[in-house]
Image: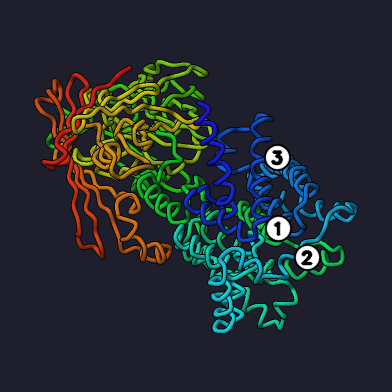
Amino acid sequence: MQNNSLHSFAQGVLRGYSQIFFTDNIWLAIPLLVVSFIDLPSGLCGLLAIMVANSTALLIGFSPYQVKKGFYGFNSLLVGLGIGYGFAVTPQVLLLVVLASFLTLLLTIAIEGWLGKYYLPFLSLPFVFAMWIAILASQMLISLEISERGVYMLNDLFRIGGLNFVSLHEWWIANVASTYINSFFISLGAIFFQFNVFAGIVVALALLIYSHIAFTLSLLGYTVAYFAYALLGVELQSIGYGFIGFNFILTSIAIGGYFYIASPKSYLWAIAIAPIIAFVTAGLFAMLSELGLPIYSLPFNFVVLLFLYSFRLRTNAKKLTEVLIHHGSPEQNLYAHLSHSNRFPFESFAPIELPFMGEWYVSQGYNGEHTHKGDWAYALDFIINDDEGKQYTNLGDKATDYYCFGKPVTAPADGFIAMLEDGINDNAIGDINLNKNWGNTIVIKHSDYLFTKVSHLKMDSIKVKVGEFVRHGQVVALAGNSGRSPYPHLHFQVQAYPYIGSKTVQYPLANLIINGERLESFAYPSKGDLLQGSTPLTILQQGLHFIPGMRLQWTYKGTETIWEVFTTVYNQSYLYCHSTKSVAWFSISSSYFTFTGFKGSKNSLLYMFYQAAFRVPLAPVKDFYVDDELPINKVFSAKRLIVQDFIAPFYRYLKASYKGELEVIGSEINPLGVTYKSSINQLVFNRVKAKTSYTLSLSPNGKITLDDGSIETGLAVCEKLL
């Protein structure tokens, strides 16, 4: 237990370094930690500061998870680096580092609480304020000595790398005279208070390896600002461009790829914001120089927070998409967003299902030819037809001749009865009642501003009362022929208000089979479509029903592997492999079992299962194939993604297509088992370069078998353990 705590603490310290670039990636943190020690006293003070901040946060009782992510430590790290660079290291300075890091933590918590009300990040504001206080306080502390280490750069370089490092430095000075290149690297190094080209080169390489998009954006933001200053005739050396330059770099990464999905629009905004930050920087520099205070990262904080807050007040957020869940890097955010938005375009919609049992036809759809027009355009009329396409038996001159007349009408989702009207006579065939246009009607409230209405119900068939709670699928009435209804049919619409006669809202229906050939999680039906609700096959529903606390024991390659089911505070379910520490997130509906994310080893059995069961239909549909796409970074190798990552915001030539087919063994009523065959094609410019196939089998006793078709691996067999 103690080793786990130390391991978590060490991770929190390391991740504090990478959090400066908006990520908790440990592999990025390691070179950044090394860079901070190019100036040894600065590096030591930075390490001391983040250790003090993280320890204090844990002692006070703040979230261990946030501490482990480096969330509460990176501002203190920057303060420690700044104090270590600015002052000669003495016991008094070390005490100042400890006090300043504690103050920075308190500022972090306070600013987080303040900005958190507006869902804004605190960025590095705590660092700026704490450093100003430290600088002003140092004027009263006579025991502190201003550091002169930066004056003797060759001595510092000799201490780090000996004569070879000094020679390399002299070669660089002699051969690379470009202010543009040198200032770029110095700006990157200055983020860690290392004002030399070599520190910047290490940071640039680390950033390049970690994220090609982040590196591209850093270069883009710096370049635009550099030439903007040159155009304005500003002497870069006179304003200390090392400190000012990283404001443009961090802002470009933040706007272009971290807080917003990387795209041509985000890149354009990263470019457009550069003149603004230049303007802000000039003003803040002039103001703060009078007070003897550096600007540090204040322009970056000011502009990014202003940008985020302003853009959240937009009425059309589609033009620049904000990242809601951060996956680690701009590339991962982009690929996850593309996959998720394509797979779950209706994710924000609560499931509203069909208001009937069995198969019904859409006789009139949106913008119908008879009545669905204007404010009431988004409505559907349903009828039942026989195999010959007729709505009725006998002569069809009586309401009872129509197949849908008297059939059960069900609640399309859980809710409360908001309003109803009953007691209206059913019409004779061909007649209509214009005085009571909607006929017998029920309005159900599912949530605020989400209501459904069923109309033209049979007289005296309503089985519910106003205020009564109804469950999805509960019979609430019978279909009839009341109101403006010349022949029996069921009118259905979604509306934002509880009144009979409210205008309609375009809203997709959930979990339905269309024309017996398509299983849809959400869809907008059209006129002529044959619809029925999707009913999950019991063997599939139970076999893939993973509940929190359940353990799955797999036997694979002669060894046993244990997975466990967990749920986050946001009700996101996931499978966790204890041996490989891999995680696969999933969701389940009446239509599909779907994996929504994966993190961990691609050599793990969990990864194979993630691929095989990426999207499994739970309701059998004859000759139906599942078509989907996996995020390309979850399929292709890092080597293959190198070029794609650079151009991903603009063009994607890689694709990972997914296809699956379900086969029921025996009958659907009493199945002996099911097999699900899936395949993944890796496409480069739409040409298949590699293919992976799986067969997933489920038996009535709950056993799951996974076969990837190779002799070497063979079968993996799973049994659930409670």
| Coordinates of residue 575 in the picture (x, y in percent) | 36, 32
Asked if the residue at tag 1 contacts the one at tag 2, i.e. Cβ–Cβ closer than 8 Å, the answer is: yes
Pointer 2 local density, CA inside 10 Å: few below 14, some 14–19, many at least 20? some
Residue type of the residue flagged with mark 3: Ile
Pointer 1 local density, CA inside 10 Å: few below 14, some 14–19, many at least 20? some
Q: Is residue 227 above or below residue 512?
A: below
Element under label 2?
helix
Q: Which residue is mark 1?
A: 302
Q: Earlier in the sequence, mark 2 or mark 1?
A: 2
Drawn side of residue 328 relative to residue 547, left or right: right
Drawn side of residue 132 relative to residue 547, left or right: right
Quadrant, the C terminus: top left
Q: Is residue 528 above or below residue 460?
A: below
- Marks 1 and 3, Cα distance to the nearest angstrom? 18 Å
| Coordinates of residue 498 in the picture (x, y in percent) | 53, 31
| 544 or 150: nearer the viewer | 150
Q: In the displayed orientation, state which residue is furthest to the left.
A: 666
Element under label 3?
helix
Drawn side of residue 560 relative to residue 582, left or right: left
- Marks 2 and 3, Cα distance to the nearest angstrom? 25 Å
Asked if the residue at tag 3 contacts the one at tag 2, i.e. Cβ–Cβ closer than 8 Å, the answer is: no
Which dot marks residue 284?
2
Which dot marks residue 2?
none
- Marks 2 and 1, Cα distance to the nearest angstrom? 10 Å
Q: Is residue 107 above or below residue 185?
A: above
Residue 276 is at least partly visible in this image: no
Residue lying at 34% horizontally and 60% vertically, measured from the top left: 641
Residue lying at 39% horizontally and 32% vertically, measured from the top left: 574
Residue lying at 29% horizontally and 25% vertically, measured from the top left: 552
| 85 or 302: nearer the viewer | 85
Q: Which residue is mark 3?
A: 109
Q: Earlier in the sequence, mark 2 or mark 3?
A: 3
